[in-house]
Image (cartoon, grey):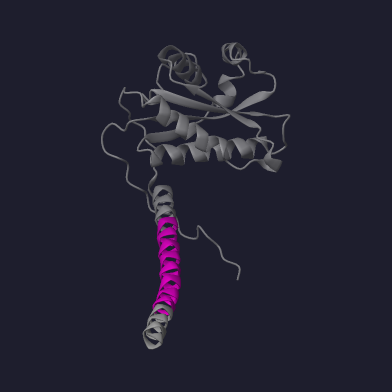
Amino acid sequence: MKKLLFILTLAVVAAFSACGPSTGSGTAAAGTEANATEDNKNETIMSTTMQDLLTRRSVRSYTDSIPPREVIEEICKAGTYAPTGMNRQAPIIVAVTNREVRDRLSKLNAAVFGPDNDSDPFYGAPVVLVVLADTTAAFTWKEDGSLVMGNLLNAAHAKGLGSCWIHRAKEVFETEEGKAILTDLGIDANKYVGIGNCILGYVKGDYPEARPRKENYVYWIE
């Protein structure tokens, strides 16, 4: 009887000894696998980001369809996360999807070229994201606004939309009509200066091909 109990005790000890290292190895393996999965995920995100940056083009032909509000909101959110001097966040974004206001801005923009100009500087794009910046918030307000514009352009491409930077926002919002639009929104037209217009929408026709990059774009000091 004592011999039987001794044998059973040895069997139990052996069983626990066998399970202990196995469990630890399993946990370690699971952790390694999770880390590898996370690394692969980060690599995929980085690869997608680089692809978006390298393939975005300025689009100058759009359909009349307005993208969903939630898509435009995501693009605007990307703009708000652009870096700004001392994090003063001098820029603001005016998202225009109202056709009447969009057309008013288009006419004001065209008028900068001359009073008889009846072209559409927005190339038919149904959405205009106007970036302005508070000149009193930071001395880097122009640079900050430009970074916001860059984020908007790249985010639009990442969401499958065409986009283009259209100038003359400064001139438009120096006019009385332009100032009135800002005032109606509760924006101090005396503090904010236009940086640019990010037009966006669905691409009409073929997506533009990239032009060759110029030589000596990058100079190295090593």
Q: Give me the residue at 28% from left, 31% from top.
A: 204
Q: Is residue 24 magenta?
A: yes
Q: Is residue 211 above or below residue 26?
A: above
For the question of whether residue 65 can be seen, the reply is yes
Residue 52, image x, y percentages: 40, 47
**Stretch of the chain drawn in magenta:** 15-42
Q: Is residue 81 magenta?
A: no
For the question of whether residue 121 can be seen, the reply is no
Viewed as shown, does residue 145 lie left or right of 104?
Answer: right
Which corner quadrant holds the C terminus? Answer: bottom right
Question: Closest to the observer: 149 or 30?
Answer: 30
Q: Main secondary structure of the magenta part?
A: helix
Q: Residue furthest front?
A: 1
Question: Closest to the observer: 52 or 142?
Answer: 52
Q: Residue furthest left?
A: 205
Report the label total: 0
Q: Residue furthest bottom?
A: 3
Q: Is residue 210 above or below residue 189?
A: below
Q: Is residue 54 above or below residue 169?
A: below
Q: Give me the residue at 38% from left, 22% from top.
A: 126
Question: Closest to the observer: 37 or 152?
Answer: 37
Q: Is residue 111 above or below residue 144?
A: above
Q: Give me the residue at 69% from left, 36% from top.
A: 88
Viewed as shown, does residue 59 lie left or right of 130?
Answer: left
Residue 91, image x, y percentages: 62, 31
Which corner quadrant holds the N terminus? Answer: bottom left
Residue 90, image x, y percentages: 66, 32
Give residue 201's quadrant in the image: top left
